[in-house]
Image (spheres, grey):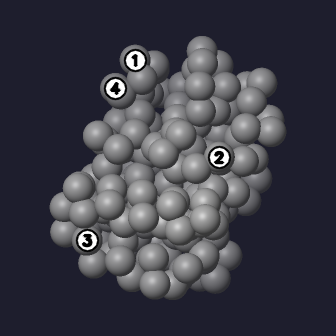
Amino acid sequence: MQLADFIDFDAIKPAFPGGNKRSLLQQLANLAGHRLGLDPATIHSSLAEREQHGSTGFGQGVAIPHCKIDGLNRIYGLFVRLAEPVDYKAIDGDPVDIIFLLLSPPDAGAEHLKALAAISRVTRHGATLEKMRGARSRDALAAVLIGADERDAA
């Protein structure tokens, strides 16, 4: 699985408002709910519940909040870069500025893990993270993500 299989490229945000972790998750839920026609409160509740099991801040300024959502019929991903990093309680203690939101149907266990792996492959490369942080537009960010996808598929 590649990012192109599930990332909503039209919804990439290069300067997303962060605030704090709670407000960030609410804003992500609002954006995803609007894009998917689903209740943002349901999405936010599921994301918050997942975070209670441990932070989805994976280090190097990257967070991958993820959860399963009833009523969703496909894996869905959003990518945002924050205007200002937020304290996300990441495993390395660093603030987070790159967010991949991943929502999956309840029965998409293996596909959910494959999508998480695709995100992880892209975000483990320091040079790719630098390009993500340096891109100034939605199109530039999309190009970085597609380029990383193609590199990892080769």
- Tell which circle, 4 or 3, labels the residue nearer the N-terminal end: 4
In this rendering, is residue 97 above or below 107?
below
- The quadrant the C terminus occupies is bottom right
Question: How many discs appear?
Answer: 4
Check if mark 4's residue and mark 1's residue have beta carbons within 8 Å.
yes
- Tell which circle, 2 or 1, labels the residue nearer the N-terminal end: 2
In this rendering, is residue 9 above or below 108?
below
Front residue of this view, candidates 36 and 153: 153
- Mark 3, secondary structure of its residue: loop
- Tell which circle, 2 or 4, labels the residue nearer the N-terminal end: 2
> Circle 1 sits on which residue?
37
User: Mark 1: which amino acid?
Assistant: Gly
- Mark 2, secondary structure of its residue: loop
- Tell which circle, 2 or 3, labels the residue nearer the N-terminal end: 2
Answer few, some or many: residues within 10 Å of disc 4's Cα (few below 14, many 20 plus, some between 14 and 19).
few
Front residue of this view, candidates 51 and 138: 138
> Circle 2 sits on which residue?
1
Q: Position of residue 144 (x, y in %)?
A: 37, 66
Q: Closer to us: mark 4 or mark 3?
A: 3
Whether residue 89 appears in this view of the structure is: no
Q: Position of residue 20 (x, y in %)?
A: 40, 61
For the residues marked 2 and 4, what is the alpha-carbon distance in whole angstroms? Answer: 25 Å
Question: Which residue is depicted at the point 74% across and 30% down?
Answer: 108
> Circle 3 sits on which residue?
135
